[in-house]
Amino acid sequence: MIEDGKITETAMFFDIPHVMLQAGLNPFPPQTAAHLVQPGPMTHDGLMFDAQDPTEGRRTLDAINGMLNDLVQWQSDVPLEVELARSWNDDMIWWGPAGIGATYTIERYVKQHSGPFRDTLTDRIFNGHLCKLAEGKFGGFFGWPNLTLTSTGGFMGMPATGTPSDMRVIDMYRREGDKLTENWVFIDLLHFWNQQGLDVLGRIKDVPRT
């Protein structure tokens, strides 16, 4: 939050399960996508020290908003691949958090994350964003929480609870052309699963090293 030109409030997410994996402790069942350390943009131009064309920022925000509108208004009779192709380039890369992983191309994204996410997390309530921004070809949003969802079982290998839980998310994107092509996703999974009755950090002492 900015007030009178100064920062008055900030929020930071740390992928603690990712650190645990690097230390040889796996707090979750095997993830559906690849476990990778998230790199910077493929184009190596994420640090922008010069003023950016505001038209480019608006194009990026339009692409993000188009993707979000499709997500909120999702209709099950529209194939997920068809929906995603409206706002994503086919060679997209989704850099997800530990427990889910990274995935490449729309086809793999559907199979490794987006499909399971929509199939096993129901009664989705969109709570809005505290912040949404874009500059040049990069943009993103932040929510506290973004979504409220109910687990019906299967997501991240976890059982159903029937309990609604909040999902805090930071999403950052890179646009290529008129579509999104890279996405860095940070989810407070420790908080999400704690609302489901699972204390991930509390049970880690019983998880064998890998």
Image (cartoon, rainbow, N blue to C red):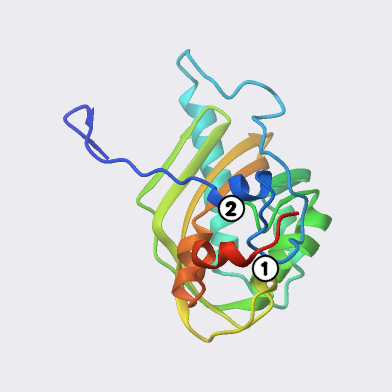
Vertical placement of residue 129 versus 116, above or below: above
Q: What residue do we see at 58% from left, 62% from top?
A: 204
Q: Position of residue 166 (x, y in %)?
A: 44, 68
**Of the two numbered discs 1 and 2 in the rendering, the one whose residue sits closer to the viewer:** 2
**Is 79 in front, or is 20?**
20
Q: Position of residue 103 (x, y in %)?
A: 76, 50
In terms of secondary structure, where does tag 1 sit?
helix
Does residue 165 appear to the left or right of 138 in the view shown? left
In terms of secondary structure, where does tag 2 sit?
helix
What amino acid type is highlighted by mark number 2? Pro
Vertical placement of residue 104 versus 56, above or below: below
Query: Which dot marks residue 17?
Result: 2
Q: Position of residue 135 (x, y in %)?
A: 48, 29
**Residue 9 in which image quadrant:** top left
As measured in the structure, the alpha-carbon distance from the residue carrying label 1 to the one carrying label 2 is 13 Å
**Is 111 in front, or is 50?**
111
What amino acid type is highlighted by mark number 1? Met
**Is 166 in front, or is 204?**
204
Q: What residue do we see at 78% from left, 50% from top?
A: 34
Does residue 31 appear to the left or right of 205 in the view shown? right
Q: Quadrant of the C terminus?
A: bottom right
Q: Are marks 1 and 2 in contact (CB under 8 Å)?
A: no
Q: What residue do we see at 66% from left, 58% from top?
A: 99
Q: Which residue does the numbered mark 1 point to in the structure image?
A: 156
